[in-house]
Image (tube, helix red, strand yellow):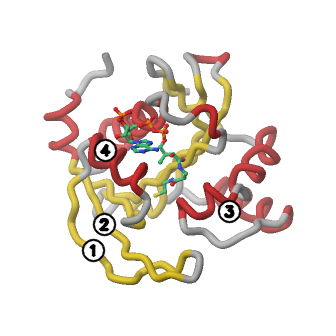
Amino acid sequence: MIIGKTATLLAFDQTWLGLVQKWVNRPDVRSGTGTEGPVSDFEHRKWYERILSDRSQRVFLIGQGQGEGAVPVGLIGLKNVNQRYRSAEYWIYLGEPDARRKGLAEEATILILRFAFMGLGLNRIYLRVMQCNAPAVRLYEKVGFILEGVAREDFLLNGRFENSALYSMLSREFEEKFGRETN
Ligand SMILES: CC(C)(COP(=O)(O)OP(=O)(O)OC[C@H]1O[C@@H](n2cnc3c(N)ncnc32)[C@H](O)[C@@H]1OP(=O)(O)O)[C@@H](O)C(=O)NCCC(=O)NCCS
């Protein structure tokens, strides 16, 4: 468990599989992340079994609240964790709309970045986002991710091609902005 002020990163285990499947099948989550759907029970369980045994992935529930009693409202993770280049790709969504606009994604992002840089010793965290996803773009820029480039017409969403943007943050940039120690 990684505890923040208003958000906690909780272990993701099978108790929460049904809830997470409900979240990934929400149209707003699917269009935000650009994933196809709907996800069946079978696919969902296969995905869960894959992440359990895949050391290049780390997945946490985002809990609203502090510590044990935090209520799961979303999912956050690192994938493509590469120990040779010390890099990973970060992703996030909040599945409960009532939990949005309360600063939870921002705090959860800072918590997972601290875990990635200080806990795993990574140097570069990157992400890909559709440029039309204004809430996500603003979140990433507010946290301090740097725009590296744009891939034109990279996604197909609701029959329209959308550009995607590649952002990254380096360990030294995180330290400069947030410090080495947990407050
Ligand atoms: C993007 C998402 C994770 C933001 O979560 P959130 O908890 O609502 O975000 P926060 O409350 O922490 O907001 C942090 C900052 O993000 C930006 N932001 C978040 N939601 C926003 C919105 N609806 N409109 C504009 N800016 C927004 C703001 O800059 C905000 O800071 P501010 O409140 O000081 O203005 C959430 O909207 C979501 O899960 N969307 C669906 C899935 C998705 O798109 N995931 C990202 C895929 S790349």
Nearest the camera: 156 or 110? Answer: 156
Residue located 68% across and 62% down the image:
50
- Ligand 1: give its quadrant: top left
> Where on the picture, by quarter, is residue 99?
top right
Q: Which residue is mark 1?
A: 150
Residue 177, horizontal then vertical, whole percent: 18, 33
Residue 50 badge: 3
Q: Which residue is mark 4?
A: 121
What's the amino acid at mark 1? Val
Residue denoted by label 2 = 166
**Eyeballing the image, is 56 above or below 110?**
below
* 15 vs 36: above or below: above
Closer-to-camera residue (56/28): 28
Circles 4 and 2, Cβ within 8 Å, touching? The answer is no
Of mark 3 and mark 4, the one earlier in the sequence is 3
Which mark is nearer the camera, 4 or 1? 1
The mark lying in front, picked from 4 and 2, is: 2
